Amino acid sequence: MQLPLSFSEIIALIFLIIALIVCIRLVIYLLKRIWNKKKYKLVWTAIDFVERRSNLSYDEFVKEYASVGQPVIITDVLKDWKATTKWTLDFFKSECGTIKCAVKEDKDEIEGLMTIADYIDYINIGDSDRRFYLANWFISDHPQLLDDYKEPIYFPNWLQRLPRKLLKKYELENPELFIGHKDTSIGLHKDPNNGSAWLGMIRGRKQIVLFTPDQEELLYSGKVNVFNPNLEKFPLYAKTNSIEVILEAGEILYIPPNWWHHVRNLENTIAVGSLLLNEWNSELFFQSITEKNSIKGHLLPLVLEFPWLGKTLFAIGVI
């Protein structure tokens, strides 16, 4: 007759099973990374214009746009958002008026802080010689806004697996609210860390000029004002081949990794957008982080695969 396992044997068996599960997960993770490095590389498609699509399935979006690095405007995603009817300048003044937020002018330098109410008043008066826009204002800071929008099905975002405090620490919080005065401009740039992005228009219109990744050497690290280029100072810019779109209220623009873009508000605008990390740019994203910090770059894929690990490492101050 077989004797029952002792308590210590049961504990050892449990640890053995856990270790086996962890090892299997790690092997799967390593095989997946090897596969991803071969499959997912920077791909982009030269185009003459950005297509507008409706009734687009996720599989169609992946096949025709994400997998080939091509931007697209999707025209019918925002129709079910409460934000399209609720989010007005008066709404934000009423609901978020006392909140202080950074304001910028053209480039990345923060000019100061303003309350949302003061900023809305500044927009409504409209007689200032300076043109400020709100910066670094995140929906996650305002739970009352979370029910007013839906994450588009086209844009799964692995960053949401990470603890919010970790995202805030490394300035990766998303999605972001953009409220801008007419004629304000977010200068020429590409999104950080080889990220892709989406931008959804709630109110107003934006003019957006895009450049394929291979034109980076002609863009002088974003110093060119695309809407009034100084060709004497930046002569190589004359060789660029840009693509211009007007993003209307109710539309979403998808921007693939490493596409440079310059954005200008044609009217007072309200928009929401998000930086993306998913299978279509993950290896590029990891490479970008690794170039800045080798340890954190190698930890990031593990943290995304095992979210509990991220919480633990963050709690003890490793990341």
Image: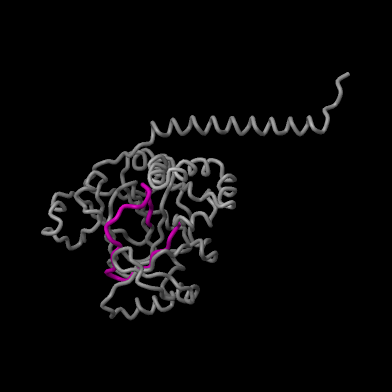
Q: Nearer the viewer, residue 179 or 194?
A: 194
- Location of residue 60 by image quarter: top left
Residue lying farthest to the right in this orientation: 1
- Location of residue 37 by image quarter: top left
Q: Is residue 175 magenta?
A: yes
Task: Residue 87: give x, y in percent of width and height.
Answer: 44, 68
Q: Residue at x 12, y 58 (%)?
A: 231
For residue 49, above or below residue 128: above
Residue lying farthest to the top in this orientation: 1
For residue 316, above or below residue 64: below
Task: Residue 100: give x, y in percent of width and height.
Answer: 45, 73
Quick check: 51 left or right of 150?
Answer: left
Colouring: one colour
Q: Which residues are magenta?
A: 174-199
* Picture quarter with the N terminus: top right
Task: Residue 225: give x, y in percent of width and height.
Answer: 21, 61
- Location of residue 287 by image quarter: top left
Task: Residue 227: give x, y in percent of width and height.
Answer: 20, 62
Q: Is residue 61 visible?
A: no
Quick check: 293 left or right of 214?
Answer: right
Q: Residue at x 33, y 81 (%)?
A: 125
Q: Is residue 286 visible?
A: yes
Quick check: 144 left or right of 228?
Answer: right
